[in-house]
Each structure stands twice: as C-alpha cells, then as structure tokens.
Image: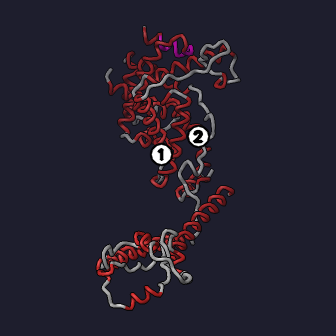
Amino acid sequence: MDEPSLITSAQRGDLDSFNSLVLHYQDMVFNTALRILGDEDRAADASQEAFISAFRAIKSYRGGSFKAWLLRTVTNACYDELRRQKRRPTTPLEPETEDGDEMDSPRWLADPSLTPAGQLEADELEHAIQHCLDALPTDFRAVVVMADIEGLDYTEVAAAVRAPLGTVKSRLARARLRLRECLQGFAELLPAAFRLNTEEAQA
Amino acid sequence: MNQRDVEQLSSYLDGGLSPSDSARLKTRLASDLELASALDALRAARSLLRRMPHRRAPRNFLLTPKMVGKKPPLPRSYPVFRFATALATLLFGLSFLTNQVVSFGASAPAPAYGIGGGADAATEAPMLEMAPAATEPPAEPTPQAALLPSTVATPPAPTADQNRAMEQPASPKASGETIPATPRPLLTPWQTTFGLLALLGAASMLLIQKLAARKWRVK
C-alpha cells in the first residue's frame, strides 16, 4: 500500500483512495475504540464516525504519523460517544443462550484455536482487563490502550491525544499502576507468572 | 516511592530513559526491593495488556458518497443554466411588479370618468350586462377580449339610440354612465417569455442533476 499517494488522492476528494486506507486501518481503529468504550456496537459506531470525520478533515493532515492522526479522530469519536453515554445511560443487551440466559462470551468472539476451557479462561481474563480499563479515567485509558495494546510509541501517543510527552509518560505510568492494583482482585484469572509476581508483591 | 519513581520505572520499562538515568535507576533497583517490586508490577500489567486479543472489525467501514455528503460532479454547462434560470425568474418578477405598479398608477385618476370610476372591469360587468338588448348582432369579440375571464362581459355594440346619445356633448357625470375599462391580458408577451424561460431552465437543471447522479451511481 502506497500510503502517501493514497493520502494525497484522498485529500483531493478521492473516496476510493480513502477507502483503501479504511481497509488497512479499520481493525486497529475498531480495536482501539472497543478498548476505550468496552462495547462492540458502540465501538463500531465510533469507528464509522471516526472514518467519516477523518475523510472530512483529511485536508488538515500535514504529514507525520497518519496512524496517530487517525487515532486522534478515533479518540475524539470515543470521547463523544462516552459523553453521549453519560447523558443517556443504557443497559447493553447481551446475547442469550438457548435457555434464555445471558451469554457472557458470545460465540462469534470465540478463538477456534483454544479448547472450550481455555477459551473460557481467556474470555474471563479479557473481561477482567476490560473491566479494569473501564475503571480508568478516560484520558488514562486512551493513553494505555494506544501505548500498550496498539503498540504506539510515546511520540505517536502524544500526537494522538494532543498532549505533551511528559503528560503522556505520567498518564501511562499511573494507568499501569492502577491497572495492576485493579487486576489484583482477579488474581485467580491471571496467568501463573503474573500470579507469582502478585504474591511476591503482596509478601 | 513517589509518583516520579513510578513514571521513571514506566519509562525504563519502555526504554525511554537516557543511558545515565537508566544506569542510576538500575543501581537503585538492586538495593530497593519496593522499587523492584513496583517495576515487576508495571511489567506484568503491560504484558497482560499486550496479551489482550486483537479484535477484528465486525464489518467494513468503507465510506459511501452519501455518508460523506458528496454530490455528483455536474457538467460545466450547469452554472450557465443556473444563471439563465435565475435571470429569467428575476426578470419575470420585475416585469410582473412593474405591470402592477403601472396599472395601479393608471387606475388612480379614474374617478374623473364618472361616479364609481376607478372600479375595475369586473365590478363594471353587471352594469354592462344590464344595458338594453342589442338590436343588431353583437360585434366580433376582439382577441384581447377573448383572454378575459368569463365573468367580464363583452360590451355590446352600440345601438342606434346609443350612437345618437354619444353624438350629444353630454357630460358623463350628468348621464351617470361609465366608460368601460380596457381589458388587460393576464400576462404580457414578455412575462410569458420570461416565465417560460425560467421553467425551461429549472427543468433543464433538474434533468442535468438526475443524469449526473445516475452516471455517478453507475460508475
């Protein structure tokens, strides 16, 4: 993918070029939105909104990391969604099993390479981490998602959240510490290596 | 251990410290168990986050022209049609207004023609219908009269008595008669032309828009 030429074409209004960029980045955008919002449907809505906003604002892109620029629009879309959610709180509808019980781990999210027991553990751990992420302040959450889940470097994160490098470092350190404290409550779900560390820390 | 230590540990974990800061921290870590434990905790949190499964987008987020409010590109001749339509509409409106003003000005001195003067043709019609029956066949209606609404009666041709009466220099006031108003067409030829041009222009613009949208969708 020739990213610079696609961006240039998109800046001239070529929607097909922009859609090529969408196809390339949509998984990253969706995953970021999912980890910030903690809800699949909202994350999908925010991702779509983010791409629409990005196309409309692409003329304002002046070089640098396109990934970071795109993640900034995603973060903004997520913040908007969170504000909306705060104004109109809703109860998410979980899919139900045949017996009518709520399904905690929807089948379509299952990883086929895992055994049922392994899948269950992985799902529970993921839920635990997501729960702890949701408990973080929004600014901290965005930083930790971009740095530790999406693997952006400090400079890219700073560009994405429009904050100084020092602020990013500080938010990331505090977010990691809070996550660690939160995850201590789910010690039985954590992998063995992490449990050992936990026990040592508690000793 | 303070907040600054935590930030340093976090940066150290990501390799974000300068070599000198890194060496200093390593020395402290060797002797400070609490600091070493905090580093392990941060490392564990980071590794757990990195193990989070990467979810794929549930659908494609491709954009459509409608989503981004894009409109189909219009041909270069489109602005000409738009300008012509706007001009024709403007001229139609102006000529209509001018006619109204002129006819209003013309009807103002009408009272000089007799009692009840200034009334329009429609109000005079009943009086004209009450005129004595014509002994001669009515004259052929003029083309202008044909444009008048049916409520406006065509003045009958003057009878012999009336002709005689007209020859006498009697004042209109004294006889109490009124002069029939000249019938006016609803639209002048210019107004008709401008109106038709405006309609034609609007229809052409609509057609161009539809064709461009269809062509765009096919593409």
Residue A193 lies within the magenta run: yes
Q: Residue drawn at (37%, 40%), measured in percent from left and top? A: A163
What are the residue bounds of the magenta stretch? Answer: A190-198
Q: Secondary structure at mark 1?
A: helix
Q: Residue drawn at (55%, 67%), measured in percent from left and top? A: B202
Q: Earlier in the sequence, mark 1 or mark 2?
A: 2
Q: Is residue B142 visible?
A: no
The residue where tag 2 is placed is: A26
Residue A146 lies within the magenta run: no
Residue B4 at x, y = what percent? 33, 27
The residue where tag 1 is placed is: A69
Query: Which residue is nearer to you in this view: A183 or B142?
Result: B142
Q: Quadrant of the N terminus of chain B?
A: top left
Picture quadrant of residue B71: bottom right
Which amino acid lies under the numbered mark 1 shown in the image of this protein? Answer: Trp
Q: Residues within 10 Å of mark 1 (few under 14, many from 20)?
A: many
Q: Is residue B76 above or below residue B3?
A: below
Query: Which residue is nearer to you in this view: B107 or A103?
Result: B107
Q: Is residue B53 above or below residue A3?
A: above
Q: Are marks 1 and 2 in contact (CB under 8 Å)?
A: no
**Host chain of mark 2:** A
Left or right position of B61 against A135: right
Residue A3 at x, y = what percent? 58, 51
Q: Is residue B180 above or below residue A59?
A: below
Which amino acid lies under the numbered mark 2 shown in the image of this protein? Answer: Gln
Label disc, if present, on residue A134 of the rendered structure: none
Query: Which residue is nearer to you in this view: B56 or A104?
Result: A104
Residue A131 at x, y = what percent? 48, 20
**Mark 1 or 2, which is nearer the eye?**
2
Q: Residue drawn at (48%, 34%), measured in percent from left and top? A: A146
Q: Label 1 vs label 2: CA separation?
A: 14 Å
Q: Residue drawn at (58%, 40%), measured in percent from left and top? A: A26
